[in-house]
Image (spheres, rainbow, N blue to C red):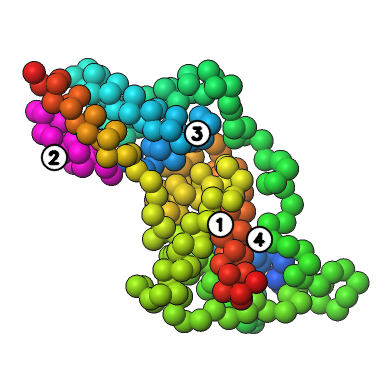
């Protein structure tokens, strides 16, 4: 089984995390990680990045828009 | 239609204001993100989401539950956003991956080139990050969250939308493909480039450059 170069490993990280790598590529990927501290660290940092992304606030509707909608909802019942 | 969804529909039909406020609050972030891919401004996206909810209220009595409530709401949203997008003469090309989305996602200069020993291997390993990054509520985690927010703002638009829907709002890849009407392969390319850029942005910030 030929070694997978680091540059290819970093391009497969998303497929690996999504579970969409084929069995053969996944084995090569994991074999590389066991031997390569740099790529192992890269994957770990990617997981940390994803955890942090989950805490980034995203705009929702403004309070004015929400209260307009609630008024419309009430009007519908009249 | 799932059971909790039929309960939600029943509550909305019965005029349950708390249930309506909750669903507007829970769904509007994703709806705004999606709407933003069709129209040119955040204000315009807000109007699309408002219009969508009004259409949902008007159509609720006729909703038969053949699709899930969420699918039905998103279909109305996309139609509303598309007709407005046409008026604004704006279309994001979702099906073609080109330009900013082609080639390696990470700077090739980070790796040894052909002709050097160990081609394709790191020139230098990525620098370690302080442990505090992963500590919830730490000062550094707060700074890093703000930094990620601005990295997100600077991403090419399609990448930003996919990353926001997947990793910020937590939708599955199936959901995102359905919402944006794109293939799994295209979704993955955009997500991968966006994630790579997000991690690289954090790395640059943490290394103080």
Q: Main secondary structure of the magenta part?
A: helix
Residue B11 within the magenta-colored segment of the rendering: yes
Q: Which residue is mark 1?
A: B151
For the residues labelled 2 and 1, the Cα–Cα distance comes to 35 Å
For the residues labelled 2 and 3, the Cα–Cα distance comes to 30 Å
Query: Can residue A20 be seen in the rendering of this structure?
Result: no
Provide the residue span drawn in magenta: B2-26
| Marks 3,1: beta carbons within 8 A | no
Q: Is residue B15 above or below residue B98?
A: above
Query: Can residue B183 be seen in the rendering of this structure?
Result: yes
**Which marked residue is nearer to the observer: mark 4 or mark 2?**
2
For the residues labelled 4 and 2, the Cα–Cα distance comes to 45 Å
Q: Position of residue B106 (x, y in %)?
A: 69, 61
**Left or right: A45 as drawn, with respect to B19:** right
For the residues labelled 4 and 1, the Cα–Cα distance comes to 20 Å
Chain hosting mark 3: B
Q: Of B35 and A38, which appears nearest the observer?
A: B35
| Marks 2,3: beta carbons within 8 A | no
Q: Which numbered tag is attached to residue A11?
A: 4
Q: Position of residue A18 (x, y in %)?
A: 50, 57
């Amino acid at each position: 089984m030929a070694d997978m170069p680091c540059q290819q490993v970093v391009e497969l990280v998303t497929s690996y995390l999504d579970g969409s790598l084929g069995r053969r590529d996944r084995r090569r990927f994991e074999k590389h990680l066991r031997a390569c501290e740099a790529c192992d660290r890269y994957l770990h940092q990617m997981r940390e990045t994803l955890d942090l992304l989950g805490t980034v606030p995203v705009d929702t509707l403004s309070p004015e828009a929400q209260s307009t909608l609630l008024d419309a909802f009430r009007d519908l019942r009249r | 239609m799932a059971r909790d969804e039929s309960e939600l529909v029943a509550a909305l039909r019965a005029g349950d204001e708390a249930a309506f406020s909750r669903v507007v609050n829970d769904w509007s972030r994703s709806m705004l993100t999606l709407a933003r891919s069709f129209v040119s401004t955040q204000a315009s996206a807000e109007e699309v989401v408002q219009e969508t909810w009004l259409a949902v209220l008007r159509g609720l009595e006729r909703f038969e539950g053949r699709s899930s409530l969420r699918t039905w709401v998103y279909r109305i949203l996309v139609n509303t956003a598309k007709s407005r997008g046409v008026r604004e003469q704006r279309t994001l090309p979702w099906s073609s991956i080109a330009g900013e989305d082609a080639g390696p996602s990470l700077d090739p200069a980070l790796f040894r080139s052909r002709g050097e020993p160990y081609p394709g291997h790191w020139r230098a390993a990525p620098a370690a990050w302080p442990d505090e990054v992963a500590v919830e509520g730490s000062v550094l985690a707060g700074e890093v969250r703000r930094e990620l927010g601005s990295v997100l703002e600077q991403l090419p638009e399609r990448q930003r939308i996919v990353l926001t829907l997947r990793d910020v709002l937590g939708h599955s890849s199936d959901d995102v493909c359905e919402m944006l009407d794109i293939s799994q392969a295209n979704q993955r390319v955009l997500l991968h480039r966006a994630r790579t850029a997000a991690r690289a942005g954090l790395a640059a910030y943490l290394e103080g450059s």
